[in-house]
Amino acid sequence: MTKARQTFGRLAEDMAAKALRRRGYRILERNYRNPLGEIDIIARDGDALVFVEVKARRSLRFGRAKAAVNALKQKQIARVAIWYLKVTDQMGAKARFDVVAIDRSAPETDGIEIIQNAFTLPG
């Protein structure tokens, strides 16, 4: 990954965290890693534990940001989330998966969309 992409990714995650905080989320972890992968943001929204995937696009060349959270990506995020729930002894917690999609090519808005309950645990 190039330095420019890493910088853009960090900026997008900072923007996402700020947008989530404005909506009342409390950020618990950023860039949580375990042997199964990474979750960009883990937050608390009311009584729900929220696992947040941040996707950002500078242009529409590769499609909209939210479209990048495909079934394979959802499965990977879910596996990491289950691991987190187990190691933190929160298997009974109310949890959900949100996506923050950032499309910088959308000048008519701030380009940030928070999609609550974007997907569920794969069956």
Image (tube, helix red, strand yellow):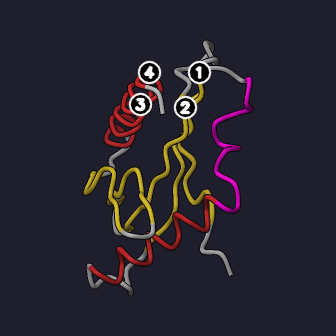
User: Is 50 above or below relative to 89?
Assistant: above
Q: Residue at x 54, y 49 (%)?
A: 99
Task: Give the magenta-colored segment's residue range.
Answer: 61-72
Q: Position of residue 92 (x, y in %)?
A: 38, 87
Mark 4 in CB contact with mark 3 (< 8 angstroms):
yes
Label 2 vs label 4, nearer the camera: 4
Residue at the disc numbered 4: 4
Q: Amino acid at mark 4?
A: Ala
Q: Amino acid at mark 1?
A: Arg
Q: Amino acid at mark 3?
A: Gln
Other-residue count near label 4 (Cα within 10 Å), few / some / many at <14 / 14–19 / ≥20: few
Label 3 vs label 1, nearer the camera: 3
Question: Is 76 positioned to the left or the right of 22 in the image?
Answer: right
Specify which label sits upstream in the sequence, 3 or 1: 3
Residue at the disc numbered 1: 58
Q: Position of residue 16 (x, y in %)?
A: 41, 37
Under circle 2, the secondary element is strand
